[in-house]
Structures are given as C-alpha cells and as structure tokens.
Image (tube, rainbow, N blue to C red):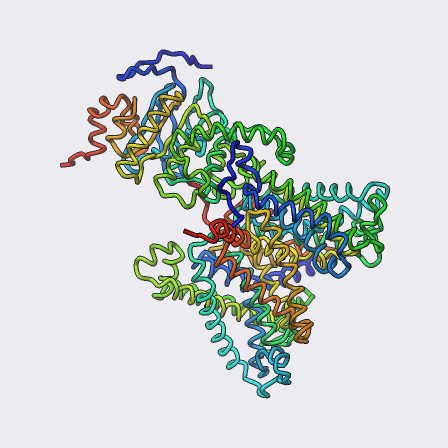
Amino acid sequence: MKDMNSEGYTTADGRKIGGVLMEMKNITLRFGGVAAITDISFDIRDGEIRAIIGPNGAGKSSMLNVISGFYVPQEGEVWFKGYKRGPMKPYQVARLGIARTFQNIALFDGMSVLDNIMTGRLTLMKSGLLSQAMWWGGAQREETEHREKVEKIIDFLEIQSIRKTPVGRLPYGLKKRVELARALAAEPKLLLLDEPMAGMNVEEKEDMCRFILDVNDEFGTTIALIEHDMGVVMDLSDRVVVMDYGKKIGDGTPDEVRSNPDVINAYLGVSHD
Amino acid sequence: MFYREAGDFKTSYVDDSQTFPIRFDRWRYYAILAVAFGAAPLLINDYWANAVFVPFLIYAIAAIGLNILTGYCGQVSLGTGGFMAVGAYACYKLMTAFPEVSILIHVLLAGGITAGVGVLFGLPSLRIKGFYLAVATLAAQFFLVWLFNKVPWFYNYSASGQISAPERTILGHAVTGANTTASAKYFFCLVILFALAWLARNLTRGTVGRKWMAIRDMDIAAEIIGVNPLTTKLSAFAISSFYIGVAGALFFAVYLGAAEVGEAFGIQKSFLILFMIIIGGLGSIFGSFAGAAFMVLLPVLLKNVLVGQLGWATDLAAHVELMIVGALIVIFLIAEPHGLNQLWRLAKEKLRLWPFPH
Amino acid sequence: MSDQILFAMEVTLNGLMAGVMYSLVALGFVLIFKASGIFNYAQGVLALFAALTLVGFQNGQVPFAHLINAIFGTNLHHFGWHLPAVVAIILTAAVMVLLAMIVEKFVLQHLVNQAPIILFMATIGLAYFLEGLGDIMWGADIKKLDVGLPQGANEAFEAVTDSVFGFGLYIDNLDIVATVVAALLVLSLTLFSQYTKYGRALRAVADDHQAALSVGISLRFIWVLVWSIAGIVALVAGIMWGSKSGVQFSLSLIALKALPVLMLGGFTSIPGAIVGGLIIGMGEKLFEFFAGPLIGGATENWFAYVLALLFLVFRPQGLFGEKIIERV
C-alpha cells in the first residue's frame, strides 16, 4: 500500500490537484527485439490533465496501451490507486475505472449511437442472464436507470439529435464525440484520450477542448491524453511528459517543457554540423 | 396513412425502448399472434402442417439460435447440423430412459445438453477468429455426426441405426409418435417458438446483446471497454446451441418421427440454416423468421411449379433449386447484406411518409 | 510384428499420396486467398465443375440436354463425337477462364470492400450455384474420366520393395503422376509469381489492394487472372480425383478436406498447403489404421478437422502463417 495522500499542488488557474492516482515505474516494452518504450517512469495525479507528447513513433500510443492493459510491459510496475497492478486482461483494467478513446475510432459500427454509449456502462450493469431473458422487472429497471445516466452524457456532449442513428453513418468529428461519450459513460476515474483532436478542423477542436475541460471540471475525472497539436496541449494540460524514441526526454509543466533543450531538439531537430 | 409515429409520444425511457414503438406495428403484432394461436390450429391440415408450418416453426427456432451466434456475436458456425443432432439424440435418449417425464422437459433438457456441447466446441473461438473458426466448427459437424453413427448406445442398439420417437402426450394430446394430429404438432412447436423468440428478443436488446454486438463489431475495442471475451463468446455459444438443440429435438421428435443422423443432420443442414439467416437478415429476430419462411417456402413453390405444373423430372428441379438458392445468396449479399429484414424496414420507412413523401 | 510395421509403412505412403491430392485442391484456395483475401469455398465445386465439363467435352455430350429436353420435349444426348483428351482439356481450361471472367463480372466486382466473412459466404452461394449448373449442364450421374493417365499398381516399386523388405508395397501409378504434376504446378506457380510482370502485380495486390490500385495495377484483371489460375488448378485436381474415383458429387466434398489442410498450413503459404496436405493425408490414414478399429472406423470423416482445430488452438496463425500482432 502506497500513501495516496502525498501532497498535491495547485494549478495556475487555482484547481486543486490531489495525490498520485497512477504511477508508471521503469516501464520497458519490447516487440520481439525492438524496444518501443525504454525505462520510463512518471505519475498521473488525481484530477489533473496530463499530456504525453512526442514525435511520430516515439511510443506514445504504446504507453497508452500499457496503461489500459492492452500491452503488458516486459519490465516495470504499474501502480493504480495505491495498489500495484498485477498482470491483467484489458477488460479487468476497464473495471478498475480506466476508460479510453482510440486514435483510429473504434466504435461499434453496427449499433446505434445510444447503444454504443450504453456499452460504456457494461462494467456497471449487474443484472444476470436469466433476469435479462425475462426482461420485465430487474433488467428493465436497470436498463432505464442507466439510460437516464447516458442521456445526461448525451445532453452534455450535445449529441441528442443523433441518438438513434447507426454509428457507421456519422461524420468523423461526431464519431470522435460519440467515442468520448462512450468512455465517459463508464464513469471512469482515469480517462485516456488517444489523439482526441486528430483530423479535426479548428471549430471541432475548440468544441473538443471545451468538452475535455468540462469533463475534468464537472466530473473531476483525471485525464491523460496524447496530442500532436502543441497549442492545444500547452493550453489544456497541467503537466506534460515528452517522449522520443521510446525514452522520456522531458516532464513538467508546459512552460518547463517548452524551455527544455532536449525537447526543442527533438521537435526542431539539431544541426549535426 | 394510418402508419404514423406522429402523435405517438413517448413519455418514459421504457416506452421508448419497447419492441414495437409504433402503435400500428403493435396492433398488427397482436393480430398475428391471435391468428397463429387462435385460428390456425383449427384450420390446419396434414399437408400444410408437414410441408410448411411445422418445418417453418422449427427452422425459425434454429435460425434464431444461429443468428444469436453469427448475426449478433459475429462467430460464424458451420456446425449447426451437428448441434441439432445433439439435441435430437439427447431428446431420444431422455424420452426412452424416462418415459414418465413430460416431453416438454425432455426437449428443454436436450437444449441444455446441446448448450454444454456448444460451449465445448466454442472454446477454440477465443484463439481462432473469422473463417478459421468457421472451418473449426466443421470439426464439430463431422465429429458429432460420426459419433452418433458409430456409437450404438446413442441409438439404443437399434438394428437400423435409426432413432424413432415413441408416442408422448401433453395434457392428453399426442405430440410425438404416429397418432399426432397436425394441429397438435403445430401448436406444440408454436408455443416453444413463441417463448424462445420472446426470450431472444429480451436478451438481444439488453446488456448481453450489447456485449455480443460489441464483440462482433470490434472485439479488441470491446475488450478494452470492459467486455470479457471469454464469457461473452461462450454465452453466445451456449444460448445459440440451446436454441439449436431444441430445434433439433423438435425436428426429430415432432417433425420427422424417425431419423438417421447423416441424412437429417448433415452438413447440408448447417448450410440451410446459415442461408436462412443471411437471406432473412443477420442480427435480427424478425430476419430469422423471414429467412426460415423463405427457405421453407422456396422448395415447395419450385416443386409445385417445375414438377407439378411443367412436369419436369424431380432431379432436374432439384438442380434448378440449387442454382436459385446459390444465386439468391450471392444476390442478397451483394444487394442487401442485411437481408429481408432490411427490405422490410425500408418498406416501413416509406410507408411512414406515404402518401406524402416530402 | 514386422508385418504390422510394413503395413504401417504402406499406409503412410498411401496417406502421403492422398495428401498430395488434398494439396492440389488447397493450392487453389491459397492462390485466391493471397490475391484477393477471399476464402473461396467454391474451390472444390470448381474442381467438380471442371471434371464434369471435361468428361462432357470428351464424350460429346450436349450441354443442358436435360433442361432442353424438359422444355422443348426433344431427346438430345450427344453430338456423336469423341474429342481427344488434349483438345478436351484445352477447351475445359478455356471454359474455366470464361467462368473466372463471369464470376468477376457478376460477383466479385460488386463485393469489393466487404468484410471477408461476407465474401466467404458469397462463395458458399457460388458453390451451390455452380453445383446446380454443373449438374444441369452435364447430368448428375456418376461418370468415368479417362484422359489416358496410367492406373493401377506400380510394379517396379512393388518389385523393389519386395526385394528389400520381402514384402511388396502397393503404390498407385496415378498417385505418382499426381505427385509429379503437383510438383510441376508448384514450381511453375513460383516461377510465375517471382519472375513475371503479372506475378509481381499479383503479389502487390496480395499485399495491399489500395496501394496496388494507386500504382496502376488493374484489380479486375488480377482477379480474373487469379480465378483463372485457380480454375485451371481446379481442373488439374478434378482430373486427378476424377480419374481415381469417378466424377460425381462427392468430388466437391474434397474441398472440405482441403480446409483443414489450409488451417494447418496457413492460408497464404504455398509450401504450407503442400506440407499441410501431406500431414493431413498421412495423419488420417495412420489414425484410421491404428485407432479406427478400436472406435468404429470411418475416422477419416472428422480426423482432419479435429487435428486442425487442436493445432490452431495452440498456433492460431497456422504452420507457416505470420505471427499476428494485434493493434488498436
């Protein structure tokens, strides 16, 4: 058991950030002989917005996959809510309260928007097979309760009008929003966003930024995100981890990172002559 | 004109998620039930029962079962015939071992046993995906048929190697055996189909159904949002096999009366049921009904026209039927991958705006 | 006891020969799968269709005779000629190419970008259609196919083994021919795909449809090409199987036997198809020889599938398939 209440900090805009929620210790991940992540450690604190940035192929997505349990690192430890996480299947990780969105949208195309968001609540729904087969009574009541919660999220993300539309028919920007809705429906403690703004236009990016800040603000959800748009990252996040070639080259507030010479080299290139 | 949702306001989420949200649909559904349960048993005769209605009801059960596995959970199975055989032989063993127990219980138990066998053959689905799995289910098909053929215990050491259903009654009416009336067969199958279809509808609209569809649409994402692939896939295999087992038991005990495994439950049966759900509509309960009706009626119709009207030889007609069925499968997959169900839904959408589509 | 070993040797040998036959069918599957990602269930029926057509041409049968007779009340049967085997084979090959074009035009073209499982089911429909078509064109009765391949026991082999073991091992001449033909087929396919322009285009399409399209390779042409090749491979398989056991419906069931071969060998590997075929052929004959008498026989019906199933549980990508790394 690790001390959860180690001191937090207060951000520039006055939000209180709590103790350590998740800690990655010396993570190394290899595919065959290729190391995607080499000996990386960092922590995510309760209530903060944490960004992971880096050039293409830096290992950011792999890092997110390690956090969500999709990849199991060869070395290192993952601590969550003060407990060391053993080897777990991704669905078990989801039940701990970690939800995520995907870089290439991973919605269930054959289902409606509403059903897609309802799948986010699967980990919270308890009724058994028999009671569902009978429907009347328990299952129906549970379904209605969860539907109410989901409708709140639908209102929050302003997607009321497409509730019953099959997801396959939606444009890209809305799909991203539905995916966020599905992740939120799980009421996660930690929300992982894999390039939430990739491929969006300016207006859509602004909307998405607002939603991310609102989620963090209203639900107190801790957020870890990967993003390429530097402006967005610097505006949104409280602290930033910078990766390059699978190694951590910087960690700190946006301002600290911006002035870090290693980071500048990685992004702008070093002159080799 | 009367097919409208305007004015039919939903004031609760319960109302909004009912099976037939449009009032007219609801009334039509009640009317069909009334005819099916009230009028049809009185009117039905042997020809219609044996040629159309009883096979339709039984195939509809099997089609719902396969649709749960393939249409909802996305696991293609070519072992349906083998699983129907498990249901049939389980039912036969139970009927002959415990003659005093009700046939209804035997049929349900046969479904339960098939569910167990289904789970066993479903285990590889955790490692094997797509058509690798489809081919793997052929192992179930061939092994099970071989087993029932070669182990005499399953057919009670009968000289012919066949199993034949002894007479069993429910409330004094024979439902199996030679003395069964057409309406008793019909009614027995109808009741079971109705109950199972209702249960299937409930399962597919709730949490379990969503888990199945999540696995179908994108299994990796499903696992990451918290769906346990093991229990989800196995539950689909179990429930699907239960339905198929019940269908197999009824097919043998009520419809055929006597059966030989290779003939009644061969690989052709697996394909037949698969075709039903493709033509009817993958991932739809209504589609299972429509597909079963279509595949039962088509041969009857062709036979009446080609053999009855034109006087062709039966084997020639059978070959034409093969071609038509094959062509239809391809046409449906090209033109309407969601089958008759989708055509029906489109028709309803049109009707909703009719006669003022703008 | 040594008799038992000799029997087992003979069984093994015959199993290997049967395996070559399975490989011939499996080869057609692999070709189509590599080039288009389609698992062509109709491959076996293609073999049946090719064999039926070949016999029909050879004997000068009137196509669709039954249908025409039924509609017009005529009594057509044969044109009354017998074509030499070579001419009939060339004509049949032409028919298979024509069939490939028709399939591309009416089926594949409309199913571009569909899920693989949809394409798989479409080929099941195609299999039904072709089976009906073959029967209507040429009649469903069992036919004898003879294109002049040597048949019967190979006496030289029997004599040699007799002098070595004191027991002549039986091996069918036809099986030897099949082995040679299979080897030639694999060799020429490999040469074709490695050293010709179309072969390179074929491999490009196999890797990535979109990319191949964007460098100007015609997908339609490649599909026709590959289905034609698969049709001709099917013709070869049809000739071998047809000469061995007559041309009849059960010929299309060997397609089902080729499926476990593919599961073992991996869908994309030509050597895999060969090795898989040999393993399955040998395995099922040996299993039947040793275990068959104990559990009632006829284990060939399922052994191949169960073997492949168990194998896949431990190695999902098959013997020669590439390891699957899942990504999100």
Question: Up-down: is B127 above or below C266?
Answer: above
Does residue B27 show up?
yes
Residue at 55% from the left image edge and 33% from the top image edge: B14
Image quarter hosting the C terminus of chain C: top left
Residue A9 at x, y percent in the picture: 32, 14
Residue B5 at x, y percent in the picture: 50, 43
Q: Exactly how many numbered labels are in the figure? A: 0
What is the quadrant of residue B319 in the picture?
A: bottom right
Does residue B150 show up?
no
Question: Up-down: is B199 above or below C247?
Answer: above
> Horizontal placement of B85 versus C51: left or right?
right
Q: Which of these two is toward me, B157 or A113? A: A113
> Horizontal placement of A85 versus C197: left or right?
right
Residue at 27% from the left image edge and 36% from the top image edge: A203
Residue at 34% from the left image edge and 58% from the top image edge: C212
Residue B321 at x, y percent in the picture: 62, 67
